[in-house]
Structure formats: C-alpha cells, structure tokens
Image (cartoon, rainbow, N blue to C red):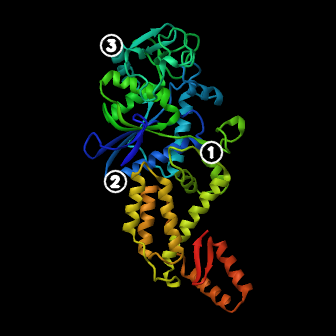
C-alpha cells in the first residue's frame, strides 16, 4: 500500500509500526448542524482506505471522534463555540443539539454504507482525560495563561512546530492567527478555554485552571492516544485541517510523548458545488436527503465521489450525479446478465474474477486510485453486456465491488412469470407485433424491469 503523505510531500510505502496491524485516526464531524455532501465526501474516502487496507490483508483499527464541544467558529481561538451556536439557533441545549445531529450522522453514515469505526468517541466523554493531558503539558512548561481567556500552548517551545504545513512562521501576516490579545507567538493556540463570567455555558467543567471547556485540538490528541496509543500509522482529514488543527494536534501529542505522532498524514481535497464553494448564501448546500428526494440511490453519490481521486478537487452538479447514477445503472445491468447466459454468445468469456481482483487491489494500493478502479468495473460491464463474461465470474466481481468499494452491483433473478413475459414479447417481436411488444415492455417496466434489445435477444435489468 502506497499513500501520499502530507508530512513528506511524497507517495510513501506503508510499513505499519506493529506488524500487520494498522492504526488509523479520522477527524470526525462537529455535530452542530445538518451534515452536507461536502462533509460526507472525506468519510467515503476514509471508508475506502479501510477497505483497501483490509484487501491487502492488514488488520485495521480505526478511531473517529465526535466533536461536541470546543470547536470555535474561527481558527484563531475567538468566536462562539459551534455547539453553543447551534443551541441558540434551535432554542435547545447544546447537549440536545449534539444528540440530534449524532443520530442524524449515524443514520446517514449507515445509508452511505460506511464501515463503523472501531472506536467512535464523543469529546465530552473524555473530559477528565483531556484535563489530565493538559495538566501534563502544563507541568512540562508548554502552557501559559491569558487572563480571562484560557490556557495556551507556547509553540516556540517546539523547534519543529508547523512542519506538517511547512509554515513560514516568520512570514505569517500579523494578525493572521493572533486575534487573542496576550498571545506570546502568532501560532499559539488554546488548550483550555475559560467560561465567560457573565453567562453560564451548557457545556463547562471544573479544571485546575478554573471552570471552562477544552480547545478543539485537544480532543483529537487525547482520544487518539487513549484508544490507539502514543503513535499511530495514519491520520486522516481534510486539507483545511493541515495548517492549524492537525499542526496543533502534532504539537500537543509530541510535546507529551516525545515521539512522532503519526507516520502518515493523509488529506482529502474539497468538494465544490455548482462550481463554487459550498455556501448557504449561494444556495448550493445539498444534503443526502436532497439526493434521495430527487430519486437517486445514495450508491450513486458514492460512485460520484470515488470517480475522482481523493486528492483532487471535486465539483458536484446534478448533471454529474446523473452521470454517476447512469454509470451505476450500467454496472447493474451488466451484473444482471449473469442470469441470462442462454441468450448471450459465449465464445469470448475471457475475464475471470482472479484477474479482476488483482487489478482492483493494484489500483487501490496505488494511493487509493479509485478512478482507475471504477474504470476496471466499466470494462467488465462492457464485456458482460457483450456476453464475454461468465455468470460465476460476475458473481465474484460483484462480491469484490461490494466488499472493497462499498457499492452493491449484484441483482436478484426475476420471477418465472416475468421470464415468460419476456419470452412472449420475443415471440411478438419475431412476428413484428409491435403493439403487443410495447404493451409487454410497459408491463415489465411497471414491475421495475427494463429491457435492452440486442442481436442475441432481450436482456433484462432492474430499472
């Protein structure tokens, strides 16, 4: 398995720290509002990463956090906590906001066919551990207090701070990350924020430094360490996390352990919508429900996502989703031919499941080359519809596509009555009784069965 490593800026071969076991940490959702399709994109890629690693024979253990406290509306340690913002917007407590959107996220994750993380941990479930972690940082001299604001990490104490993002710290524009008065360095960040004195927060805890709540970066360092250990193999997230969130995770963790936090840092690029940044003000924020309400299978969105490489920028349009849906439909039409070999030529059944499996593995091991993997399925579909793939081979292909790409392409056989209807229609076509032929086609269409007329006879598919 080779992956692009943001830390080295090169495609490196994965060599797990613990034999055959791969430990992965994935930055999870901040559960303060309805997730949109851009939020889900990365999780499809990280699901694919887990599937690809297992295809290579690795034992994978993955942790994903749930951010339900501490994520401020800006990266400069100013602004409102997003959970509190959600509470004000909906007129309920921050705890209720978290419960509401965790339930939605779990439902949508299952609908997308995402494999569940081995450890799915809410930030609020590890507050004591976060406080203990911050105390250790404090005892090592990495923290200082800004009166009335919080405890901050002194980034000047680390010689390699900003290595992941290759930050030009001296060249950073004044004010770029220093909105909080009292910071010693432009890149310093909050580890523990103090509660305001004039209002009671829904989420706040007693600590050695006073009542408050953890900074956003703290939870990931702590949850990763508590569930996976001091060092992990792969840390995943969006490219927007590189300069601040992931850089600060590394600083905290390595200040405690003195060891490299993660061997690989793997980042997915963003998704645009209608050619522009996803934004409520532009009216181009789409959800999975929006996709389903338009009659699309969510598997089509997964095909759309995997149709681009995880490191390239994507663009969602309804036309692009339609193309993905058509691609998926063609695969399913092809898989339906496994029930219909009697009407197909068999002279060129030159594809076998073993060859496809090896080619699929090779594509996924090459920095998750999902576009190539999908092209392999296209090739199988073309040959299947031309009668050049045996039914048992198609079963094997469908199994691999489902297991390693998370896309269901296999279809069940039709009933004997439906087969008789197709045979009757074939007779009508032979007799040029087009009215009866059309009537029977319409009857099958009402039952969700489509027909493709070929020189070898009519091939059915589930429409």
Q: Residue at x 50, y 84 (%)?
A: 342
Residue to which mark 1 is pinned: 287
Looking at the image, tell me whether mark 1 or mark 3 is earlier in sequence order: 3
Q: Position of residue 90 (x, y in %)?
A: 64, 31
Q: Secondary structure at mark 2?
A: loop
Q: Residue at x 53, y 70 (%)?
A: 382
- Label 1 close to label 3 by CB (< 8 Å): no
C-alpha gap between disc 1 and disc 3: 45 Å
Residue to which mark 2 is pinned: 56
C-alpha gap between disc 3 and disc 2: 43 Å
Viewport quadrant of the C terminus: bottom right
Q: Position of residue 412 (x, y in %)?
A: 50, 71
Residue 412 visible within the image: no
Report the mark closest to the observer, 1 or 2: 2
- Label 1 close to label 2 by CB (< 8 Å): no
Looking at the image, tell me whether mark 3 or mark 2 is earlier in sequence order: 2
């Amino acid at each position: 398995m080779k992956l692009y490593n943001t830390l080295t800026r090169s495609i490196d071969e994965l060599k797990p720290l613990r034999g055959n076991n791969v430990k992965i940490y994935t930055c999870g959702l901040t559960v303060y509002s309805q997730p949109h399709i851009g939020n889900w994109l990365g999780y499809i890629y990280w699901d694919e990463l887990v599937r690809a690693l297992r295809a290579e024979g690795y034992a994978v253990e993955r942790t994903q956090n749930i951010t339900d406290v501490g994520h401020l509306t800006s990266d400069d340690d100013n602004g409102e906590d997003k959970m509190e913002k959600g509470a004000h917007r909906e007129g309920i407590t921050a705890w209720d906001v978290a419960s509401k959107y965790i339930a939605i996220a779990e439902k949508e994750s299952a609908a997308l066919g995402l494999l569940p993380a081995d450890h799915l941990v809410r930030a609020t479930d590890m507050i004591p551990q976060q406080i203990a972690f911050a105390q250790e940082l404090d005892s090592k001299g990495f923290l200082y207090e800004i009166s009335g604001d919080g405890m901050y990490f002194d980034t000047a104490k680390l010689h390699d701070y900003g290595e992941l993002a290759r930050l030009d710290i001296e060249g950073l524009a004044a004010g770029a990350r220093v909105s909080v008065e009292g910071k010693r360095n432009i890149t310093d960040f909050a580890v523990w924020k103090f509660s305001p004195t004039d209002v009671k927060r829904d989420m706040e805890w007693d600590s050695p430094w006073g009542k408050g709540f953890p900074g956003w970066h703290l939870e990931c360092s702590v949850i990763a360490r508590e569930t996976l250990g001091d060092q992990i193999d792969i840390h995943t997230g969006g490219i927007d996390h590189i300069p601040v969130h992931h850089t600060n995770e590394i600083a905290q963790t390595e200040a405690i352990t003195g060891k490299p936090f993660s061997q690989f840092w793997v980042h997915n690029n963003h998704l645009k919508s209608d050619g522009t940044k996803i934004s409520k003000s532009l009216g181009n924020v789409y959800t999975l429900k929006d996709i389903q309400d338009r009659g699309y299978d969510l598997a089509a969105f997964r095909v759309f996502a995997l149709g681009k490489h995880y490191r390239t920028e994507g663009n969602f349009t309804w036309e692009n989703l339609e193309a993905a849906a058509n691609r998926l439909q063609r695969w399913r039409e092809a898989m339906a031919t496994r029930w219909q070999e009697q009407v197909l030529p068999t002279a060129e059944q030159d594809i076998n499941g073993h060859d496809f499996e090896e080619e699929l593995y090779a594509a996924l091991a090459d920095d998750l080359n999902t576009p190539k993997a999908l092209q392999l399925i296209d090739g199988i579909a073309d040959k299947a519809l031309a009668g050049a793939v045996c039914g048992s081979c198609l079963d094997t292909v469908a199994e691999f596509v489902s297991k390693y790409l998370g896309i269901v392409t296999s279809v069940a056989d039709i009933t004997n009555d439906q087969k008789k209807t197709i045979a009757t229609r074939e007779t009508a076509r032979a007799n040029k009784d087009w009215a009866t032929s059309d009537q029977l086609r319409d009857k099958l269409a009402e039952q969700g069965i489509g027909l493709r007329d070929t020189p070898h006879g009519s091939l059915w598919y589930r429409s």
